[in-house]
Image (spheres, rainbow, N blue to C red):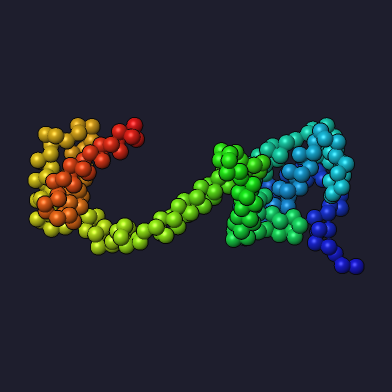
Amino acid sequence: MATNKKDLTIRTKPWSYEEAVRTGRELVRIQRKVTLDLVRELYSAREVLSQQGYGGGRESYITSCQMAQGSSGSVIHTFEEFLQAIGIPKRTAYNWLQLYDKENDKLLTQEEFKAMKIVEFESLIKQLNPKFPEWRPDGWSQACESYYQSKIKERHLIKLAESEHFEQLDLFNEAFFATISAPMHTAEEIMHFSEIKKRIESIAYPGAPVNRQAHAVIIVEKVLRDFPEKDRKGVAKALAEATLLLAMEEN
């Protein structure tokens, strides 16, 4: 008679806390990484220990909450105690448990897990109500929120791309960005930097290194060269005011 995959996890004897600890500790010692055998042990321990106090009786390889008792028949443990006993951090254990596909008794690859979570997130996002933008459905997590926010930013980027040409926005002008970010190599560049540093020392902010502020001035100077000479003073004034405004908003 063929063996069903689900039958692979059925235990032939009652679950024992002490035996599970010995097995789990040995698997951790030998492997020191996620394996199917280890995750099976974690899953079994979590299922059994989570039933303590609930009377058991659920149809599965767990037949009674009494299985969670030690050999003495009186000690009841928590899953966190089990993890500590076998030497696995709680966060690591729960991350590994997310990779366990019990129906097929296998570990999901990172690609399979990511695809599964995206399907889950998309399903939750469909439940959002535009009239109540702050409301979130049951099962919503921080990971889902991050995914949702990335989708919003993606939509905004698409709208921007449809409304304006990126080349007009000058977002990918590699030559321009390479110019303003290039390090100083020549003697002339170093001497010019030294001159700028001396010129701003009397007006530089005393709470920050003058040389760092001089670097910022050099970058602004390079940016200004990209504008027609007749506009540079006006642009410099506007940049100063805009920079001050941004700094004040951050506070």
Q: Is residue 250 visible to the viewer in this orientation of the structure?
A: yes
Pinpoint residue 140: horizontal percent, then vertical percent: 62, 43
Q: Does residue 213 appear to the left or right of 72 in the view shown?
A: left
Pinpoint residue 37: horizontal percent, then vertical percent: 71, 55
In the image, residue 61 above or below residue 72: below
Q: Is residue 30 visible to the viewer in this orientation of the structure?
A: no
- Residue at 32 percent across and 62 percent down: it is 167
In terms of image quadrants, where is residue 67?
top right
> Which of 149 and 82 lies nearest the eye of the viewer?
149
Pinpoint residue 169: horizontal percent, then vertical percent: 31, 57
In the image, residue 148 above or below residue 163: above
- Residue at 18 percent across and 39 percent down: it is 210
> Which of 56 and 39 lies nearest the eye of the viewer?
56
In terms of image quadrants, where is residue 58?
top right
In the image, residue 103 above or below residue 74: below
Q: Which corner quadrant holds the C terminus?
A: top left
Q: Does residue 179 appear to the left or right of 23 in the view shown?
A: left
- Residue at 75 percent across and 35 percent down: it is 77
Q: Residue furthest bottom?
A: 1
In terms of image quadrants, where is residue 130?
top right
- Residue at 50 percent across and 50 percent down: it is 152
Counting the numbered discs, the total is: 0
Pinpoint residue 225: horizontal percent, then vertical percent: 16, 54
> Which of 78 and 249 lies nearest the eye of the viewer?
249
Q: Which corner quadrant holds the N terminus?
A: bottom right
Q: Residue furthest right?
A: 1
